[in-house]
Image: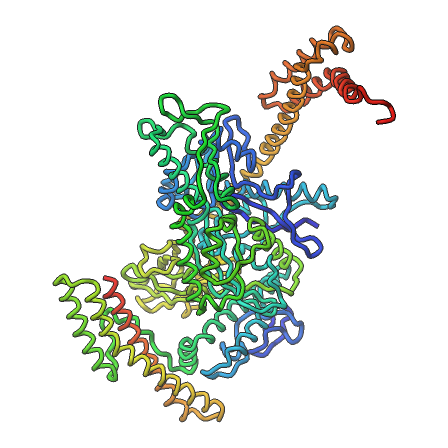
Amino acid sequence: MCRSCGGGAPVDAHFCPQCTKILTLGRQGDYFSFLSVPRKLNLDQAELERKFRALSRQFHPDYFYNAPVAERMASLERSSYLNDAYRTLRDATARVGYLLELEGFAATPVNGAANGKVEVPASLLEEVFALNEELDEVRSLRTGGASREQLQAKLDRARLPIEQKRREHEDELKALSGQWDALVDRRAGDEQRRPVLAALRQRMLERNYINNLLAGIERELAN
Amino acid sequence: MSKVVGIDLGTTNSLVAYVRDGVPMVIRDAGGDALVPSIVSASAEGPIYVGREAQRRLLTDPVRTAYSIKRFMGKGAADVQDDAALLPFRVLASADDGVVRIGLGDKAFTPPEIGALVLRELKRRAEDHFREAGDVDAEVDRAVITVPAYFNDAQRTATRDAGRIAGLEVLRIINEPTAASLAYGLDQRRTGVIAVYDFGGGTFDISILRVEDGVFQVLSTNGDTHLGGDDIDRVFVQYVLDLLEQNDIVVQVGGTYEAGLVQAIRKAVIAAKHELSDGDQTEIVIPEFALGADGRIARAPGASYRLTLTRSAFEDEIRPIVERTLEPCRQALADAGLQPVDIDEVVLVGGSTRMPLVRGMVSELFQRTPHTELNPDEVVALGAAVQADILVTGNRDLLLLDVTPLSLGIETMGGVVSKIILRNSTIPATGSEMFTTAVDHQTAVDIHVLQGERELVADNRSLARFKLRGIPPLPAGLPRVQVRFQIDANGILSVTAAELRTNVEQTIEVKPSYGLTDEQVERMLVESFEHAEADYDARLLIEARNEAESVMLATEKSLRSPDFAEIAKHELSPGEPRAIEASLAALKAVLHGADRHAIHTATHALNEATRHLAEAIMNRSVHTALAGRSVQDI
C-alpha cells in the first residue's frame, strides 16, 4: 500500500501507480524480481549492473533530500534493499545461497565447526582423514622445532588434495546451476526442481566444510 | 534563500566551496588564500583564535594552541596516548565518560568542539563572501562535509557532531576521495575505472571507482586514518634533531628539548618539505634560534639557525612512510577484483601528493601518469560543493554510490566477532541478526557492536553497546529478537530491533564507546551559541588592534623621519608634536586592553592628531619627487 496516497500497488512496483510517489518496503519482491532479472544462477552480469545503476538513479536518498519524511524513509529503505540485492546476486556463491533460502532449501551455515557438531560429509571422509594426519604431523614437527619453511612446505602439500576437491566442487556447482536454469526455462514443476535444489544444497554444505578446512590450514600456518 | 556549501575539514587545512551557476569554486579570503589552517588557539586573555592567527600562535603560545585534531575525532583515551606524548598541548581523558578532551590553558574542548570552531570560521568566511557578492540571504546553514574514506562510524559521527555544534545542518558526510572524483568530473560521458590516491595531512585513502552513465560507483576503498604529512613532518623533525646532535650541538637539557625548539623545527621542516617538491636541495631555517658559544642551540630573537638538505637525503628518510601507502592500494585492487593494469585513470589528492617521491611511487604501482590538473588541496572541497548542489537541486546528472570501508559486526560467544555487513558494501546497506535469551523470563539483552576486519573483539573498533529492553518474558531461547543494522548514505549506523513472535518493537539504549551522547552535543550547541557573541567580540577586538597597530607604526615612522624637525618647525602648530606624542601614548595604553571601543576612539584620535603631519610629509615627498623636473615632464 502506498503511504503517500493510500492506494494499492503490485509487489514489484517501486513507485505508486496512482500518485507516482516512491513506495515504502513491506511486501516487496525477492532480490531477483526486485531487480527484474530471472530467478537463475547464471546471470548476465552486464545486465545486472545496468539494472542496478538504473534503479539507483530512481531511489537514491540524494534525490529525496527535500522530499517529505515518508518518501525519504522509503528511498533509504528501497536503496538499501537494492544494494543488498545487488551485492547478493552479483556474487555466484551468495546467489546460490540466496536461491536455496528462497526455495526453502537453506544451507544452514557451518558455524559449529569449532564445537564439533558438524558431521563430515561422506564424500570428504577420505580427504579429511588424511588432512588430520598431516596436521598432527605438522604439530609434532613444530614442537620438535622444525623451521617455518619446513612446516610451510608440509602444509602446502596437505592442502593440495583439499583444493583439488574444491575445484571439483566448483565444477559440480556450475553443472547443477546450468540444470537449474534449464528447469526455469522449461517452467518445470516442483518434482523436477527439488532434486536439483537438494543437490545444490549438499554441494554448498560441502563447500563450506572445505572452506573451513582450508581456513584451518591457514590458521595452523599463522600459529 | 540561505546558502549550502561543501567543506573539506582537513587535518592541516580546511576549505569551503560552493557551486554558482553550475560551477564549483572555493571561497578565498581577501588575500586570495583558500586554506584555513585547522588550528585553534585559546589565548590566556580569553579570545579564541582560529586559522592563520592561531597558526602564528603555534610558536608564541604552543601549549594553548591545538592542531591536527582530526586525528582525535571519534577516538578514546587509550588510542591517543602515543600522539599526545608528542604534542605541546594537553590531551585529557575523562574517567567519567571516556571522552578525549584537549586542554588549552584553563579551557578543555572535545575534538568535535575544536572541529566546530574551524567549521564556524569557514561558515563565517563563506557568509562574508556571499554578503560581499551582494546576496540577499548570505546565511550558510547547511553543508556537505568530507571525511577520509577509511573513517569508521565513531569518526564520522564525531564529524557530524562538529557540524551540529557549529550550527550547520550536515546534509551529508561524504568520503574525500569520492568527492575528489566528482570534482574531476571524470564525467558522465566517460566510462572507466579510476583510482583516487588521497594522501593528506593526517590520513591516507585509496578508492577504486567505476564511472558509467554518470554513476560514480565505488568498488573498494582502503586506507590508514593515521598516516599523512604529519607523520612525514614528525620523522623529519626527529631527523633534524638527530642531525644537530650528531654535530655535537646540545638540543636538550635534562631530557627535555629547549623550549619551543621542536615547534620551530617543525615550522622549518614543513617549509623545507614544500621547497623540496620543486628543488633538489633546500635550506632548513630554524627561526628564532641560534647556536651559542657553549654549543647549545637556544632561543635568539631575530636570529635563525640554518642547515642544508638534499632531496635525496630527505626522501631516504621518508620512504618508509610513503611505502606504507602501497599495501592499502594493493588490498583495494584485490577487493575490487582488479589488477593495476585495469585502472584507466589515477587521480592524486591531498597536499602530500606534491612530493615527487609519492608521484613516482604511484606512477610505478599503477603504470599510469596520474592526474594533477586540479589543485590537490582544493579538489575535495570542490567535490563536496558538487554533492551539496546535487542534494539541494535534485540534479540527477551525477550519482555517487559509495561503500562502507569497514565490516560491521557484533560480539558473539568467546569474544569472537560475527560480521553482519561486510566492508565495501554499497551504502545505504542493511544487515540483521537474530538474538534470543539465555535464561527464563529474561527481558533484556546486551549487544556489542564492532567495526573492523579482525576475528577477535579485542582487535576491532568498539562502536557502541546496546541494551535491548522490553523482550516479552518467555522461557529461555524462545524469544526471537531481530536486530536490524542500517548504514545510511553517510556511512553512519543506526540500530532497530523487534521481537518477531509478539511483533513488539524494542527500545534500544545506545552508549557510544568513544563518542558524545546526543545530550552532550545538544549542550555544546547551546554553549557555542552562548560563546558566539563573545567570539564575535574577540574577532572585532583583533581587527581593532590590527588597525591601531598600523596607525601607530605609520606615526612612529613619521616621527623618526629626517624631515620631521623641519616640518614641525614650519608647518605644524606649536602644540601639535606634543599632542601627537600624547595620542600615541594614549593608544598604547589601551591597545592590549579588552575594550575595543577605547581602542577605536584612541586610534581615531591619533589619526586626527597626525593629519597635518601626514599631509605635510605627503606634500614633501611629492615635492621631492618632482624637484628638478620641468612642468612639461609631468
- Look at 48% across and 63% down and name the residue there: B367
The quadrant holding residue B291 is top left
A68 left or right, relative to B497: right
Out of B383 and A107, give the one closest to the viewer.
B383
Q: In this view, which residue lies farthest toward the left? A: A144
Out of B556 and B157, give the one closest to the viewer.
B556
Out of A39 and A140, give the one closest to the viewer.
A140
For the C terminus of chain B, give its image quadrant. top right
Residue A128 versus residue B431 in the image, above or below? below
Q: Can the viewer see residue B334 in this picture?
A: yes
- Look at 60% across and 77% down and name the residue there: A9
Residue A126 versus residue B540 in the image, above or below? below
Q: Residue B338, percent across and down?
A: 45, 69
Q: Can the viewer see residue B598 in this picture?
A: no
Q: In this view, which residue lies farthest toward the top? A: B574
Q: Residue B89, percent across and down?
A: 43, 34
Q: How many marks?
A: 0
- Look at 36% across and 67% down and name the residue there: B479
- Look at 63% across and 13% down and name the residue there: B585
